[in-house]
Image: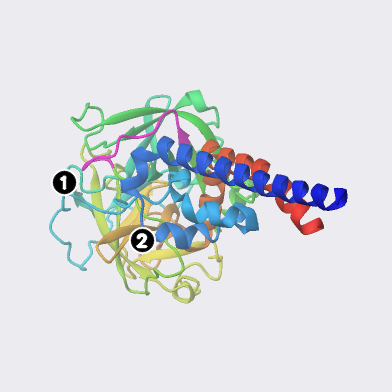
Amino acid sequence: MQKTIVTEVARMESWITSLLLIAGYVSLFADAQQRSSGYLRDYSPNCKRMMRSYPICDDYVMKYVCLKSCTYSKEFPLSCGLRHVTSSDEQSENVIEETNRDSLLNEDELLRKRIVGGTDSQEGAWPWHVALLFKKRQYCAGALVTPGWVVTAAHCFGKSTSTVTSDWTVTLGEYRLGSKDAFEQTRGVRKIIIHPRNFRYWDYGHLDIPDDYDIALVQLSHTANLSNWVNTICLQDNIVTFPYGKRCYIAGWGKTTWAGSQPVKLQEAVVKLVPRTTCNRPESYNGKIHQRAICAGYAAGGVDACQYDSGGALACEHGGRFYVHGLVSWGIGCARPLKYGVYANMEVLRSWVVQTILNEEPSIQHIANQVNNVFRPFLNSTMSG
């Protein structure tokens, strides 16, 4: 009789513990939703699919939480890749010849990329495009992928600059360099994260090979205020792909001729995606374009990204949204025939961006730790029983 009572009491305690654990979870999740409520309406239906690929969601305890709390990552806003201001008139595929070419390339020239053969964009046409200022001078560009993070090229933080966060400023909604635009937002830099496998070939004297894993993330001092003029660009998933020959956009404030001056207004240009096999032909890059890089441009040259545009998005449209398919990275000269523009391959590098941002976001780590603390002891005892 006494043994039966003890057994029943133990069972009741187990049920009470379970109820308390569930109540604890509900409380945590309610707190999660409340703290994230400002982002709820901005999150894409793609979130659930994307969350399944996050390492933290591989844990069976976290999988349900991940799928139910997409907002924690502050990722993939519903508004990503949408433009409320159209670009300039569609450009013709006819391209102009570059009239000023240099045969000698040095590191500084290769580092800073600019738009050749472009036209003035409209203010707000590329709301994810940001200016990266090194010691108050525009040096590189980047793309806003979440309200708090910018993706750019790793080589922007090289020998000519630094990785000291206080040296850098990010301007969102920038249109006219050197003047304060109505929709402009300025942010400091909290953190710079360079891909751990980034390899800079020219540091070893190989000037004819694009940097490997040429990608970095910049965390803003505080999040951007999303609007019609400041918005994020979408990251590709495995569903969205772009065929060779697809017309995509580049933008920037770089020099419009090799030895010219920088334009005041943000420039834009259309380039076509080029097969890697074409880009690796002997007359082009002779097999030097690796899997972490892609090519875009024209065989005749004339349109390209070059000085001061490194890190800017190669933006491709699908279903009414723009996706960052590449990042301005490298090239032999600018806009030369058969020397296509080379971009960091975001189709390959996207997963690093997502995982890194999630690992740095305190909210997702906070929910992971709390849920594990609540559920893990109960699940361990259940499994052991």
Q: Nearer the observer, disc 2 or disc 1?
A: 1
- Magenta-drawn segment: 219-230
Residue in front for this viewpoint, 180 or 25: 25
Q: Residue beneath label 2, please?
A: 336
Residue type at mark 2 is Arg
Residue displayed at 45% across by 70% down: 279
- Viewer-proximal residue among 74 and 328: 74
Left or right for 23, reference 97:
right
Most common SS among magenta residues: loop
Instruction: Kindly identify the residue that appears in the image at 31 percent across and 71 percent down.
Output: 246
Residue identifier under label 1: 122
Q: Position of residue 84 (x, y in %)?
A: 18, 49
Image coordinates of residue 27 in percent, x first then y, are 51, 39
Counting residues from the start of the chain, the first of labels 2 and 1 encountered is 1
Q: Is residue 212 visible?
A: no
Question: Which three-letter amino acid code belongs to the residue tagged 1?
Answer: Gln
- Dot 2 falls on a residue whose secondary structure is loop
Residue 130 against residue 349 in the figure, above or below: above
**Is 307 placed left or right of 10 in the picture?**
left
State the mark number for residue 374.
none
Spatial CA span between label 2 and label 1: 27 Å
- Residue at coordinates 37% horizontally, 39% vertically from top-left? 37
The 10 Å Cα crowd at callout 2, few under 14, some 14 to 19, many 20 or more, is many
Indicate whether residue 226 is drawn in magenta. Answer: yes
In the rendered structure, the answer to whether residue 105 lies left or right of residue 369 reads left
Q: Is residue 385 magenta?
A: no
Q: Nearer the viewer, residue 179 or 51?
A: 51
Q: Residue at x 50, y 57 (%)?
A: 51
For residue 292, side relative to residue 89 (left or right): right
> What is the secondary structure assignment of the residue under circle 1?
loop
Residue 237: image location, x then y, percent: 44, 64
